[in-house]
Amino acid sequence: MQNNLEHYDLKKILLYTIVFTGVSLVAANLFGKDVASTVSLSLYVPVTMALVILSIILSKRFGIRGDHGKAWFMFSIFAVLWFIAERVALYYNLKLGEEPFPSEADAFWLAGYPFLFAFMILYLRPVKNSITKKMLFIALAISIASLAPILYITQHQNMDVDWSEFAIAVAYPIGDAIILIPAIIGVMLFFRGKVNFLWSLMCIAIIAEMIADTGFLIVSMDNSYYEGHPVDIFFIWYYIIFSFGVYHHITIFRDRRKDPYKNIQELR
Amino acid sequence: MDVTTDQIKKALVAVSIEHVLFDMGTPVFDEVTRALHDKYNCYIPDCFDHPEYLKEVLKELYGNSYKNIVKSVHKQLDEFADQQPIEEFLKAISE
């Protein structure tokens, strides 16, 4: 009962956080690019830091033992790599007043994808025999369908664009589509279970990231992107949604080593 | 101290369950034991007599895929599956 209440409260806080960050960035854009940039950068710092702290807490709790322990270790590496990427981007924004694309930050972002993929594979490993061909087909179909906007953009591509830049920009939605496959399988496998909250949020977060990456690709092609652009809302939501998923997992797998036994006689 | 065959089998089942849960992660084992205690006032060895308790706890935590975790326990006990109390436990937990 108490758990259900906590779960309901967590959903409500997540919703408020999403609305608050979305409205803040849209409102900031009404006051100009400088204000939007300041608001965006000040939102990125806490949300990325929260994900790193929460993932390290969970990784420490699980240790390196067991499939889930290894999975959360991989997740922590992913969170740290993306945190570094965001800080590199922040450094360029503060030093140059703009974010070059591509930059060193892209190397950290792209390096994060294999670790996130490894996290999902390791987490699903103990229940891998439950994965049916039908599940795999559904996940693949959704993943491929999610690439449709990228295919459309590629076909209507302006030939003057720098192809190396374009390839890096396209790598993000492709990476998202790949990690969407185990995320969808996870939702189907853990349906009705407590851990499904994390997997559902991961799916939603990846979809938000796909929208953001596709949006970024479109606006960067016509050079209209600036720090704090409304497309950044989806990037910020990605970190928030992921953080709430990880936090929920922390509440399920609490550290109980210090819990006293209510009745020591029961152990005998 | 005399130990009965049933007690040995009970211990064997408990070790197998613990092995599967620890393979997933120590906090998974902790959470399952906590849920068993809070909901049914029992510990892992008691699942030998009440496999349905373990089934319910795993279902609540891992939803549809609890069956696969049960299968892993089954695999651990495969070579003893022909012994009656273990056979009954495996049958009950797999239903």
Image (cartoon, rainbow, N blue to C red):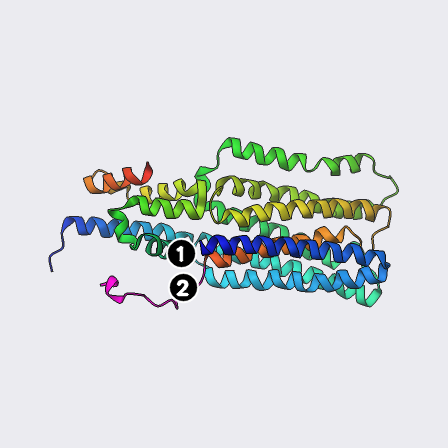
Residue drawn at (19%, 39%), measured in percent from left and top? B84
Residue on which the image places disc 2? A256
Residue on which the image places disc 1? B31
Helix, strand or loop at label 1? It is helix
Residue drawn at (54%, 35%), measured in percent from left and top? A136
In the depicted structure, whether residue B3 falls above or below residue A95: above
Residue drawn at (20%, 42%), measured in percent from left and top? B85
Q: Amino acid at mark 1?
A: Glu
> Is residue A121 visible to us here?
yes
Q: The residue marked by circle 1 belongs to what chain?
A: B
Q: Are marks 2 and 1 in contact (CB under 8 Å)?
A: yes
Q: The residue marked by circle 2 belongs to what chain?
A: A
Q: Give the alpha-carbon distance from disc 2 to disc 1, as whole Å.
A: 8 Å
Considering every residue shown, the one lying at the far right of the view is: A160
Left or right placement of residue A184 versus residue A259 in this view = right
Residue B52 % position (x, y): 31, 43
Q: Quarter-wise, where is residue A229 in the image?
A: bottom right
Considering every residue shown, the one lying at the far left of the view is: B2
Residue A40 % position (x, y): 76, 60
Q: Nearer the viewer, residue A14 or B85?
A: A14
Give the mark count. 2
Magenta segment includes A261? yes
Left or right placement of residue A208 versus residue A128 in this view = right
Helix, strand or loop at label 2? It is loop
Residue drawn at (57%, 33%), measured in percent from left and top? A138
Q: Which residues are magenta?
A: A254-268
In the depicted structure, whether residue A134 falls above or below residue A3: above
Left or right placement of residue A24 versus residue B33 in this view = right
Magenta highlight: main SS = loop
Q: Nearer the viewer, residue A129 or A259?
A: A259
Density class for disc 2 (Cα within 10 Å; few <14, some 14-19, many ≥20) is few
